[in-house]
Image: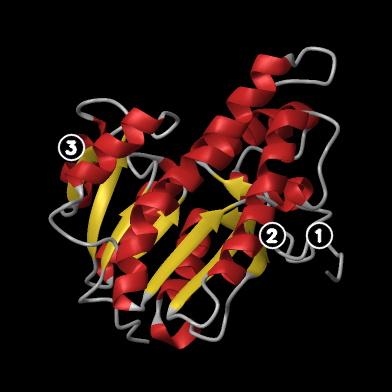
Amino acid sequence: MDLDLAHRTALVTGSHRGTGQIIAETLLAEGAHVYVHGFNPGEAEAAVEHLGGGIPVTGDITTDAGAQALADQCSDNDIEILINNYGTADPGTWPSSDTDDWIEAYQKNVLSAQRMIRHCLPSMRTKNWGRVINLGTTGSSRPNSRMPAYYAAKGALANLSVGLAKEVSGTGIRVNLVSPGLILTPEVQAAYLSKGQQKGWGSTWAEIEPHIAKDIPIRRITRREEVAALVAFLCSPQADAIHGQNIRIDGGAVDIVT
């Protein structure tokens, strides 16, 4: 399927590594012009070299100044597609997380997105076309007791997404939230391989994964490439009727209807 993105310009926050880098790679493969974002000098440049394409940009979007610096670097092209991929789940518990931890979680997982939306929305309104995809988590609707600040912040991001979708009603801008469950990253795979070998489930990932995913209906963990493919589809004209939605991609692990 041609996603018709060859003439579009995208910014993927936190795309110097991980899932964000794979999202950037997927959009590049569709012919989009992609700003690849890193927080520290050299991160985005290394990612662009690895990807074989993209435009490196740098800025700490957990601050107003850093977000402005990033927006300034993108000023040569209007951002038509904003993927707020950046976010982080710092370890924490109810007893151990203090006020500063909660504020930091909100800065990283909510205000980082809000800042870039504020910078990109005016040009989207002018063109009467745009896509804002926020990366959430299934934990925003089914949180664990651990990492309460993170899940609360992601819940706020979900709320933000719905409010923004209403704000741009009647325009060509579409806003959606993509909420993965457990994603197969190298770190996740290494941790579960070690756990599986200790429990005697086998020595290879093919042997161990079914045990890890026994409560997931598809009996495996979602791949990062699948998340990226969903994000790319939501950016396309084919997804024009999808708006204001929280789309879970978790293999059916969360069974709530709403």
Kind of residue indicated by mark 3: Glu
Q: How far apart are marks 1 and 3 (CA)?
A: 37 Å
Kind of residue indicated by mark 2: Asp
Q: Quadrant of the N terminus?
A: bottom left
Describe the element under mark 3 as helix, strand or loop: helix
For residue 244, side relative to residue 187 (left or right): right
Q: Earlier in the sequence, mark 1 or mark 3?
A: 3
Q: Do the residues labelled 2 and 3 touch (CB within 8 Å)?
A: no
Q: Are marks 1 and 3 in contact (CB under 8 Å)?
A: no
Q: Nearer the viewer, residue 168 or 41?
A: 168
Q: Name the residue under label 3.
A: 45
Q: Earlier in the sequence, mark 2 or mark 3?
A: 3
Picture layout, residue 64 above or below residue 11: above
Residue at 83%, 20% in the rendered image:
94
Which of discs 2 and 3 lies nearer the camera? The answer is 3
Q: Where is residue 180 in the image (x, y as percent from the top left)?
A: 63, 55
Residue at 18%, 43% in the rendered image:
73
The image quadrant that residue 64 belongs to is: top left
Mark 2, Cα crowd under 10 Å, few <14 / some 14-19 / many 20+, is many
Q: Name the residue under label 1.
A: 254
Q: Which of 124 and 54 is in front in this view?
A: 124
Q: Which numbered tag is attached to residue 250?
A: 2
Q: How far apart are marks 2 and 3 (CA)?
A: 32 Å
Q: Is residue 43 visible?
A: yes
